[in-house]
Amino acid sequence: RKDILSKIHQTFKISYIKDTILPIVLDDATFGTLSSIILFSNIDILQALSSDPEFMGRLFERMKEAERTSAEWKNLVAFLQEICDHAKHLQLQQRHQLFMNLIKLGLFDAICSILQDEDDSVRLKGMDVMMSTMQHDPSLLRGFLMQQEGDDKDTAGLLRTMIETLLAESESGLQEQMCDVLRMLLDAESLQPSNKERSEFWDVFYQKYFWRVIGVLTEDSCPNTLVLVLDLLCFCVHVHSMWIKYFIMRNKMVDRVAKLMYRKEKVVVLAALRLLRTCLGLKDDFYNTQIINHNAFAPLVDVFLANGERYNMLNSAVLELFEFLKKENLKPLIKYSVEKFWENRLSTIAYSSSFKQLKQMHEQNVNNENVRAEGDKTVMAELKISRMRRRRDGSMDKEEESYFESDDDEAAMAPSDQMMMDPNPHPQPFPSPRVAGSVIFNSASLPPLPSLGGGSPWEPLVDYDDDDDMDVSSSHQHQQQQRAAEEEEDGKERKNGKKNDDGDGRLYTSTPLAASETPTNVGEDAPSAQAGEKPPSNEPPSS
């Protein structure tokens, strides 16, 4: 199309003016205007090319037919790189549609062919294309890798090509970029929420390609490759804490990493030390056991003592590792370090007190364990004795009997609480006989009442039998009979003259009056005194 071709030429001319002819003369406003024009022109060109299905199809067909050593192949790779690079300026929906169309046409197959090229410049362009797709959505590449691994073909797939690119020695930066791509693929945060995709991809990587990565950890490998692989393993240990354990134990990774500390390159020694520190930072018993079983601290202590008192990165890293052991009190590793390396090795270090404090902590841990063991033995012995004290008939032992026989709680308990807690209360001594079915009050807390017959005001009218086996109905009938007898006796007393009431309101006393005394009507007023007589005085006569 001529309009697209003319727009491409126009954009190229503007870019040449901005970057070559007038880079110093242009002010900031003009420079920004030209950059905006170039950006929007590239977006229009890219949208026009992506909307043409025949153009993209011819592009990938020509890449398959072109020879790997020809200039056409390099131009096609460079053109594909520019398309993926300018795609990041599109909107999300348009960018996703563009990459989906490219993948359907064979984008990842083309990347696999580009990475197998012998020219590093071409391989770098292929890595840029892969990084563009990974920055958009890592699941696109991960899904293609899973589909390719499921075909069970003997041909080299893209994942195998990526692992070989990581392990192949290169000075162009391919290894660093490939390490970043593998991290993005293995990152748990970039995976889908479903555990199926996560488990399937990790299974493929660990079962088929992890042994290739571990196999590089030898003494004759390239230092740059070793550092990148060790950094990738640090990432896997931190992210895949459960999945990687079996493969670490199977491939003896801790032993391989420990031997790398004897390398002359300090950067390799520090990378190996960084991996050990990552394993310790998880505070997992699995990694602690692996370090102790493979004696992984022996090369570390040898390198630390060989470094002497030089204050460098290695010295600081080793001191920080032992400080971490002391701070977190990792007892198995502290015991292993002190018992294995204290005599004639760590004890000779005088410029740092970390190792002396580590030994003191080990002694304290041993003392605490001994005290705890003695306490456990004492508790077990007491339990055994208490079991022996129990009788065979299932009765209580001495401690239980003494507890229930103690009167401290009963003395402090109120009488009402004792009656509520004791289902069979025993009769308590009271000042007066108890009446069945009645409530007993304390006479000391009540005011004195007038007596009816001259006796005690609290003396019961009827002395009921205190029989606990009497039921409620018989007790009520007995009370009614006693009340009727009491009323009959009261009537007899009234007839005998003890209490007389003639019904006219005049109340007479039961005692006979003297001859000189005259009964007085209570309801009438007393007769007035005769004239000249003085009323009787209440004062006693004078002597």
Image (tube, rainbow, N blue to C red):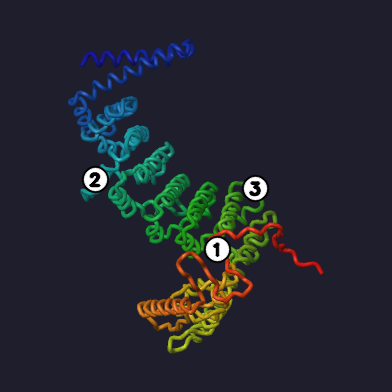
- Which is nearer the eye, 465 or 353? 465
Question: x, y percentage for residue 388?
Answer: 49, 86
Circle 2: residue type: Gln
- Residue displayed at 30% across by 30% down: 77
Question: x, y percentage for residue 142?
Answer: 29, 43
| C-alpha separation, residue under disc 1 versus residue under disc 3 | 125 Å
Q: Mark 3 points at which residue?
A: 311
Disc 1 crowd, CA 10 A, few/some/many (<14, 14-19, 20+): few
In screen coordinates, is 163 left or right of 465?
left
Circle 3: residue type: Tyr
| C-alpha separation, residue under disc 2 versus residue under disc 1 | 130 Å
Q: Which disc is residue 148 wearing? A: 2
Q: Name the residue under label 1.
A: 522
| C-alpha separation, residue under disc 2 versus residue under disc 3 | 51 Å
Residue 381 visible, this orientation = no
Residue 266 visible, this orientation = yes
